[in-house]
Image (spheres, rainbow, N blue to C red):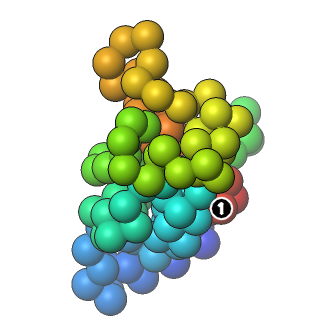
Amino acid sequence: VETNIQKNLVGSAMAATIGGFNAHASNIVTAVFLATGQDPAQNVESSNCITLMEETVGGDLWISCTMPSIEVGTVGGGTSLPAQAACLQAIGCKGGGDTPGQNAKQLAQVVAAGTLCGEL
């Protein structure tokens, strides 16, 4: 917890980091974007994140990764390429979904979950 505070929060503030807080979100975002047919140029906005860690009363680690501006889509563009469509299918995000935007929301959650795993 203390390392996260010193490295990701204080260190990033001292370096005048905007939006990344010393996380390596852009690596995960770009990998998922390329695999799922997203526009890799949207990496800059989509990598905006902050990772927080706290020790709970019971002594467990609580960690969160907030990514407020992930830009993804599951219909059109590169999502129709065979390999990318297969990746979207494998994670249950291919197409528009039963409710408009449902699969895009799920894909954004996959990106955030992958980033959180990388931060651990």
Where is 96 relative to 5, above or below? above
Q: Position of residue 76 (x, y in %)?
A: 36, 42
Given the current orientation, which residue lies at the most extreme bottom position?
A: 15
Residue lying at 47% horizontally and 46% vertically, measured from the top left: 79
State the residue position of label 1.
118
Residue lying at 64% horizontally and 52% vertically, measured from the top left: 83
Foreground of the two, 28 or 82: 82
Q: Quadrant of residue 46?
A: bottom left
Foreground of the two, 81 or 6: 81
Horizontally, residue 63 falls left or right of residue 8, namely right
Q: Quadrant of residue 118?
A: bottom right
Q: As shown in the figure, which amino acid type bears the numbered disc 1?
A: Gly
Q: Quadrant of residue 13?
A: bottom left
Horizontally, residue 82 falls left or right of residue 58, namely left
Quarter that holds the C terminus: bottom right
Foreground of the two, 35 or 7: 35
Horizontally, residue 43 falls left or right of residue 3, namely left
Query: Does dot 1 land on a helix, a strand or a loop?
Result: helix
Q: Position of residue 27 (x, y in %)?
A: 55, 72
Horizontally, residue 5 falls left or right of residue 101, namely right
Question: Looking at the image, can residue 48 be seen?
Answer: no
Where is 43 relative to 7, above or below? above
Q: Position of residue 4 (x, y in %)?
A: 55, 67
Foreground of the two, 32 or 9: 32
Q: Position of residue 104 (x, y in %)?
A: 41, 33
Quarter that holds the N terminus: bottom right
Question: Looking at the image, can residue 103 be seen?
Answer: yes
Given the current orientation, which residue lies at the most extreme top position?
A: 98
